[in-house]
Amino acid sequence: MSTKQLDDLLTTLPRERQPERDLWPEIAARLAPRQQSRHFGKLAIAASVLLMLLFSWQWPDRTEPVLAWQQQEQQWQQALSQQLAELQQVNPAFGDWQWQLQLWQQAINQVKVALNFYPDDPGLQHKLASLYQQQLSYVDWLASTSY
């Protein structure tokens, strides 16, 4: 059967199809009647208060404190500039190593944009630190294999 034949058959079917009999009375009869406890309201209030306390509780930050990301960025930029200035001829096996540095810089810029909205977010601060560290490690690796 072709797709066109199937489509033609589907167009002949009615859009809505009603069940032959109403099934809800049988289903409703099988359901156990609900018994509401008088303590349900008190339990609901206690659970609400507990949830509010849990969500308002600030868990201690178990990560090491992070300096303001702007200060860290200045330190990383200085270290990167120094490493690039000391870099001699790069091994041709690395190919377009400057392109790789540009990729890291694009990722760093994206995290910095997010940090403009959430400057106190430790996850974003750590991601920025990680990206800068990867970039610095890469340049260090380039320097150690250059001649």
Image (cartoon, rainbow, N blue to C red):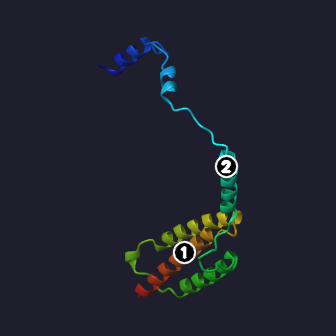
Q: Secondary structure at mark 2?
A: helix
Quarter of the image for the C terminus: give it.
bottom left
Image x and y of residue 92, in percent: 39, 77
Residue at horizontal 61 percent and vertical 66 percent from the top: 111
Image x and y of residue 108, in percent: 59, 69
Which is more toward the observer, 71 or 58? Answer: 58
Tell me: residue 98, above or below residue 84. above
Quarter of the image for the N terminus: give it.
top left
- Mark 1 vs mark 2: in front: 2
* Residue with the mark numbered 2: 44
Which is more toward the observer, 27 or 122? Answer: 27
Within 10 Å of disc 1 (Cα), the crowding (few <14, some 14-19, many 20+) is few
Type of amino acid at the residue the image marks with label 2: Ala
Which is more toward the observer, 74 or 9? Answer: 9
Tell me: residue 94, above or below residue 23. below
Which is more toward the observer, 111 or 9? Answer: 9
Q: Quadrant of residue 20?
A: top left
| Callout 1 touching callout 2 (CB < 8 Å) | no
120 displayed left or right of 26: right
Q: How far apart are labels 1 and 2 at the CA level?
A: 45 Å
Q: Can residue 121 be seen here?
A: yes
Residue at horizontal 58 percent and vertical 73 percent from the top: 126
Q: Secondary structure at mark 1?
A: helix
* Residue with the mark numbered 1: 130
Q: Quadrant of residue 62?
A: bottom right
**Given the current orientation, which residue lies at the most extreme front position?**
38
Type of amino acid at the residue the image marks with label 1: Ser
Image x and y of residue 29, in percent: 50, 25
Within 10 Å of disc 2 (Cα), the crowding (few <14, some 14-19, many 20+) is few
**Mark 1 vs mark 2: which is more N-terminal?**
2
121 displayed left or right of 4: right
Image x and y of residue 32, in percent: 51, 32
